[in-house]
Amino acid sequence: MDTFTFKRAASVAEAVAAATAGVDAKFLAGGQTLLPVMKQGLAAPSDLVSLARVAAMQGIGVNGGMISIGAMMRHADVAAHGEIKALLPALSVLAGGIADPHVRNRGTIGGSLANNDPAADYPAAVLGLGATVVTDRRRIAADDFFQGMFTTALEAGELITRVEFPVPERAGYIKFPHPASRYALVGVMASKSAQGVRVAVTGAGACVFRATALEQALAKSFTPGALDGVAVGADDLTSDRAGSASYRAHLITVLAKRAVARALEVRS
Amino acid sequence: MTEHARFGKSQVRVEDQRFLTGQGRYIDDVNRPKQKHAAFVRSPHAHARVVTMDVSAARALPGVALIVTGAEWAARGFGPLPCRSPSKVNRDGTPFKEPTRHCLASDTVRYVGEPVAMVVAGTADEARRAADAVIVEYAELASVTDRAAALGDDAAQLWPEVPNNLCLDFEQGNRAAVEAAMATAKHVVRLDMGNNRLTAVPMEPRGAIADFDAATGQYTLVNCSQNIHANRDLMASMLKIDKAKLHHLAPDIGGGFGAKNSVYSEPVVMLYAASKVGCPIKWIADRTEAFLSDTHGRDQQSTVTLALDEHGKFLALHVDTVGNVGAACGTMGPFTPTGGTARTTGSVYAIPAILYTSKAVFTNTVQTDPYRGAGRPEAVFHVERIVEFAARTLGIDPVALRRQNLIKTEQLPYKTAVGLEIDCGDFPAVMERVLAMSDRPGYAARVATSRAKGLRRGFAVTPYLETSGGAPHEEARLAFRADGTVVLSVGTHSTGMGHETALAQIAADTLGIDLTRIRFVQADTDATSIGGGHGGSRGIEVGGSAVLKVARMVIEKARGIAAHLLNSHVDDITFKAGVLSDTKTGQSVALDAVIAAAGDTSRLPQDMSAGALDTTAKFERETYTVPNGAHACEVEVDPETGVIAVDKFWCVDDFGSVINPMLADGQVMGGIVQGLGQALLEEVVYDPQTGQLLTASLLEYALPRADHVPRMEIAFFEGAPTKRNPLGAKGSGEAGCCGATPVIVNAVLDALHEYGVRHIEMPLTSEKVWSAITGASA
Ligand SMILES: Cc1cc2nc3c(=O)[nH]c(=O)nc-3n(C[C@H](O)[C@H](O)[C@H](O)COP(=O)(O)OP(=O)(O)OC[C@H]3O[C@@H](n4cnc5c(N)ncnc54)[C@H](O)[C@@H]3O)c2cc1C
C-alpha cells in the first residue's frame, strides 16, 4: 500500500472541504471496498478522509412513513434495528444478507451506494423502494442516482449523508448469491406503495435497474401468479462463468415471484 | 479386551487450547532478528519466451539487497525440481518424459505464475515493489490448458522433446480379458466423465524463513510444508549441499491437503539467497500467489465402460483417462492420473477383468500433484458413476445392482484385477448398515414433502474403497526428562488433524501415564532421522504403529530396570497400569520410579547408563491398508433455479480400529465437505484462449461454506481390524472425499431422473442443473 495522509472529519463541511483540498482525496467509510483495493495497488489516494466522527451521518430515525438512515450506519446496524424490522423487514433481511459478520460490522450503506458495485445489495433496496439519497448539497431520487457500472450521480467531493426510505405497503427481497463471492448473482427487490410497484434488479447487469415488464404485470395484481409467463430479456444482461445472461434473465422472474410471495407473507 | 481397543476413546484435542486461543505458531508468526523479505517475479503469460530481463531499475529501489534471476540460477548449476513418480514406464516399455524444470525459469515460461526471479529487500513491501519493477520482455507463444486438447496435433507444444505433450502413456490391468469380455457381454455401458480441477486453498498460505550460518555452514529452513524429511533430502541435493547441513522444520501448519507436499521453488531459492545475503529471508504467499502457484489436484477426463451379463453381474471394467500434469512434472509427476488412480480401480466390486489406461499430458497450467486422495477418489467416482448409470440404463435398482456385485466377505482376502490385495473388511455389512441408518422407510414421505415445496428429492448410496499411501516407514522417539516430561518425537506431520492428541494417546495409554505429561515434537529433521510427513492417510497406521512400538520397547527396558531395582529376574516382571511388579515376590515399583532411576547410571544395571529409557523405534508396514465404507445421502433440487441442497448424509467407515473416534469423525467430516466442494462448487478454470487463471481469488473460486454442509451421521465399523499393523488401524484421512463426491452427484441425478437427465459434469452448478432440466443450452 502506498502512503497517504489520514484526516478525520468532525462535520459534513469539514469532510467535504478535506476531500476537495486533497490532490486525490477519498472518503473512508467502512473501508471494506476501499482498503482491499488500496492493498492490491489498484487505488492510491493521496488523502483518506475518515467519516467515522461525523454526527450527521449517524443514527436511524423513523418519522411517519419515512425511515432515515445515516450514511455511516453499518450493515449490522440496519439488520438489527427494531423499527426497520417491524416496518420494512425486507430491508433488514437485505442488510443482514450482505457478506459476512466481519464485513457487516464495518461496511456502511453510504459506502455501498457511493461504490455502486453492479452486484451489491443496497442499490436494489434504494431503487426498489424508491428511496432518496441525501448529500451535503442536494437530494437525489433513486431513479437518478445509479448511472452505470460503479458510476453514480455523485459529483467529485460530494458526500452522501443520509438515505431516506419511504415505508411501502409491502416489500420483499430475494438474493441469489454468487457461489464464490456471495454478492448477488441476481437480487430482486419488489415493493408496492402509494406511488406504485417497483421491481429493482441487481447483479444481473452492469448496474441496478428496474424490470419494467415485471412492474407492469405486478401493477395489475401484486401476486406471484401475475408474473407467470412474463419473461425478462437477456440482451443487456451480464454473462459470466457463474451465470449466462439467459440464466440470469430466468432467475429474475423466478426471484421476483419469490420476492412478491415474501412481501405478501410479512407485513411491511 | 483386545490390544487396539484400548485407545478407542474420544479425547478432546490437547492442541485446541493453543489453536483456539490464538496461540498457534504459524509460519507468519515466526520472525528472526535482522530478517529480510523475498518477493517473486512471476510470469503473466501462459506460454512465452523470456526475451530480456532488466533488473537495473528494481536494484536501485530502496531496501533491495539481492535479485536472483532465472539466468543466474541456471548459471549456478543448481539441480532441477525433482520428480518422484512411482509410475514412469510407458505401456510400450519406454521411459516417461520428464523435462527439466528449474526453480526459476530462464528461457521459457510455461504457466501463469511461474517464477522467473526473486527479489530480497528490507521489508515485504519493498520486496514487492522491486519485484514489480523488474522489467521482463516476453515473446508470447500459443498455449494450451485443456487436458484433452493438449494431445492434439495442432495443440501448442510445451517441450520440444515431448511430442503431443504426452508425459506418460500408462496401462495397467488385463487388456485381453477386458476386450474379450466387452466383445461378448450382454450389456456394455459407457459414460464420459470429468474430475474437475481443484485447488486446496489451505487456510494458511505457504511461506518460509531461510537462514544460513556462515560460521558452521548450516542452513535452516522453517517451512510451511507437510513433507519435511523427504523434501530436506531433495532440496539439499538440488542445492548440492550435504543434507546434514540443512535443518528443515515446520511450525504449526494451517492445512495442507497435499498442496504443501511438493518441493517448491521458493524455499530453495531463498536458501541460496540467505547464504548470499547473510541474513534470514522470509516469504509469505498472498492468496493470489497461492491460487497461481500451489499445486492443483484432480483434472482428469475419463471414458468409463462397464460390461455386464444378462443378470447384471459385472464382467469387465475399462477406464480410459487423460490426466493433466501441468506445465512440467511436479514432485509426484504423472503419478496421480496413472498409477494413483489405477490402484483402486474397481473399488469394492468383484470385477473379473479390469483395464486402466491413461495418458498424462503437459499443459500450460501449474503442476498438479496429490490432492486429498490422489487418484483414489477419482477411481471411486468412475466406478460409482458407471454403476449408477448402468442401473438406470438397464432398469435395475441401483442398490440391488451394487449389492449383487460387492466382493463378498468369504472371498477375502481378495486380489483385484488391478492387483490390489484386500486383506479384510465386510463390504456387504457396511453397505447394509448405512442403508439401515438412512431411514429408507421414511423416504417416500420425505419425497412427497419436498415435492409439495416444489422441490425434487434424490437418494444414493455409494460404497467406497481406497488405500493408504505415502512412505512405508516411520520413526518415533520417546525421551524422559528429569521434570517428568515425556518427549514424543515423530516423523509424521499433523497439519491440523490432531496427532498431538491421537499419537500421544497411544504413547500415554501404553505407558500408563497422563496425557498431559507428553510433549509432542513433529516435523523437524533434528528430532527424528526419518519422517514421512503428512500424506496418504498414514499418520495413525504407520506413525501410530511406530509410537506403539517405541512405547512397548520402553516397557521392555523398564522391566529390565525394575528387575534390577527389585532384585528380581526380568522374566518375572509384569507391567500393568503404570506399575511393574514381580509376580513371584509381589514387590512392585512404579514406572515413574523406573523413569527416575533411568536418569542415574548408579541405579541401573551394568549394561545401561543414564538416559537408558530414551528409545527410538522404526516401524515399516508390509503394505498399505484398505479403508472402506459406504456413504448415503439425500439431496433436494429446486428445478426452477437448479439449486441443490444436500439435506441428509450418513456414512459408515471401516477404518479398522479407531484410536480417537472424535478425531476420526473430524477427518470424515472434512473429507465429506471437500467431496461436496468437488461435486457442487469447486473448479479451477484457465481461460482456454489466453491461459490466464480465471479463478485466482475467493471471489471466483467457490468453496463450500457452513450452510452447504448437512448434518452428518457417521458410524464406524470395527469388525475387521487389519493385521497389517499392530494397531489394527486403516487410514482415515482421505476416505471422506472418496465417498462423498459420487454419492452427492448420484443423488442429484436420482432427483433429476424424472426429467430424463442422466449425467452432468462436475461441479454441478445451479446453471448446469437448470440447463439440464430445461434442455436449454448452457
Ligand atoms: C468479503 C466481502 C464481501 C462482500 N459482500 C457483499 C455483498 O454480498 N453484498 C454487498 O452489497 N456488498 C458486499 N461487500 C461490500 C460491502 O458491503 C462494502 O462495505 C461496501 O461496498 C462499501 O462500504 P464501506 O463503508 O466499506 O465503504 P468504503 O470502502 O469505505 O468506501 C467505498 C467507496 O465509497 C466512498 N464513500 C464511502 N462513504 C461515502 C459517502 N458517505 N459519500 C460518498 N462517498 C463515500 C469511498 O470514498 C470509496 O470510494 C462485500 C465486501 C467484502 C470485503
Image (cartoon, coloured by chain):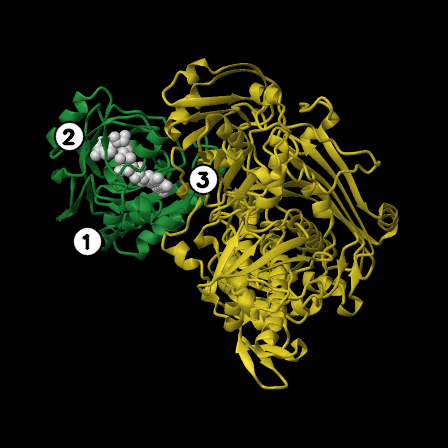
Q: Chain for mark 2?
A: A
Dividing the image into 4 quarters, which one contains the C terminus of chain B?
A: top right
User: What quarter of the picture does the N terminus of chain B occupy?
Assistant: bottom right
- Mark on residue A83? 1
Q: Quadrant of ligand 1?
A: top left
Front one among A91 and B717 = B717
Q: Toward the viewer: B228 or A98?
A: B228
| Residue contact between numbered discs 3 and 1, judged by CB atoms under 8 Å | no
Task: Determine the secondary structure under disc 3.
Answer: loop
Label 1 resides on the chain identified as A
Under mark 2, the amino acid is Ala
Furthest toward the bottom, the residue is: B585
Alpha carbon distance from label 2 to label 3: 34 Å
Image coordinates of residue B571 in percent, x first then y, are: 68, 77
Horizontal arrangement in the rendering, residue B573 relative to residue B416 (left or right): left
Instruction: Specify the amino acid type for callout 3.
Output: Leu
Label placed on residue B698? 3
Q: Which residue is mark 2?
A: A15
From the image, state the color of chain A: green
